[in-house]
Amino acid sequence: MLQKRRTVIMGAAGRDFHNFNTVYRENPSVNVVAFTATQIPDIDDRKYPPELAGEFYPNGIPIVDEEELLYLIERENIEDVVFSYSDITHEYVMHKASKVLSAGANFFLLGMGETALKSKKPVISICATRTGSGKSQTTRRISEILIRQGKRVVAVRHPMPYGDLAKQAVQRFASESDLDTHECTIEEREEYEPHIRRNVTVYAGVDYGKILEQAEEEADIILWDGGNNDLPFYQPNLHIVVADPHRVGNELTYHPGEANMHLADCIVINKVDTANYEDVLILRENIHSITPDVVIIEAASPLTVSDYETVRGKTVLVIEDGPTLTHGEMEYGAGMIAAWKNGAGEVIDPRPYTVGKITETFEKYPDIGPLVPAMGYSEEQVRDLEATINAVECDLVISGTPIDLEKLININKPLVKVEYDLQEIGRPTLEDVLKQYGF
């Protein structure tokens, strides 16, 4: 009888499931005893369901808090631990490795050779060095160019399956009503809505093999719309990576952002309009130290602010995209820049007004600036977000999240919405690079 390797996969409801599906699900020599979960609130204490886990796992696989990892290794005689999440420092990864090794288990990282699926259709992947660098607007810009050429474009988004995993195996979003049907979180809506408004169908879910089969049926070109700074799940014909000069140096010190840099065919240095240009130059040098011949595009993400004339002199509450502020570690985003540029009188710190899950977010991420992260991974979190916003004493709210928050929560004060798209500066442009690679 073959002795199965007893294995734990460390994750955050995304890369971990994909690694299991591609490498371990049909592997008779491995027994995945558990997944661990971190980064995203309330994604533990459930099971990877038997419908997705396959014939070797008739009872599914438990998902437990990462805090239980060392106990799991000892109790379950774990031999191998597979690290499978993103947007953390190299030092953080090795601290985790040291704990695992000291507990007697092996520590693994999986590469694209085993985990990246091959598509029958051309794939353009858009990834990044950090969360919040500007993947979304870069993906939208590429889809705009391709659609103008008459191409059928489908975006496949990095997973965010925070609910019923069996129901979320393959999700297709072609209209805003699909967001309601699939009971999407705020975080999911932030990624899917802008594509849908541009008539681009979005796929996401858990089983990216089945997702790929469906996406190929209706696409001439597939855009891999990456999450965090993770590597693509599909083998790309063109790999574009977005780098952020507001966090210069992170491109060399975060996992797997540095790996993305090594793999890049083209790197977009975004936000050059709001960054210190010395940082842009340092970022260029850091890029060339890794990939000397890579094509570099400089770009901005100019803001469009609704009712911008109402901002001047007002006391404002700023709301920003949640993940950019939490594990992305940014202290501000588009909303705060809009407040500065449009002459807000005072930005109100929401901390004295927070309740419930929003209070917990600030406790977990104390370096968040004086603004509210649009956290909405659960109904409870959405309600606490609403209560926090409505408790703050201010003249108006500036929303830097790409969705229409007022469709989801009732806000008791005027709201100004901030939108942003990618704009290349000079040459080469994204269109130049697409032509170079035959698109």
Image (cartoon, rainbow, N blue to C red):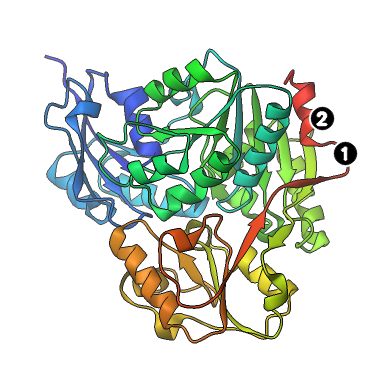
Residue at 51 percent across and 19 percent down: it is 218
Q: Could you say which is closer to the camera, residue 49 or residue 261?
A: 49
Circles 2, 1 touching at the beta carbon (< 8 Å): yes
Residue at 65 percent across and 33 percent down: it is 143
Q: Give the image location of residue 190, x and y in percent.
A: 50, 51
The amino acid type found where label 2 is placed reads Asp
Indicate left or right for 220 with 35 as reference.
right
Q: Give the image location of residue 124, x and y in percent.
A: 62, 27
Q: Give the image location of residue 347, x and y in percent.
A: 60, 82
Identify the mark nearer the N-term, 2 or 1.
1
Rounded to the nearest whole Å, what is the CA distance between mark 2 and mark 1? 8 Å
According to the image, label 2 marks what residue? Answer: 432
Residue at 39 percent across and 22 percent down: it is 209
Q: Is residue 77 above or below residue 421?
A: above
Q: Could you say which is closer to the camera, residue 10 or residue 41?
A: 41
Q: Could you say which is closer to the camera, residue 373 or residue 140?
A: 140
Q: How many marks?
A: 2
The amino acid type found where label 1 is placed reads Arg
Q: Is residue 343 something that shows in the picture? A: yes
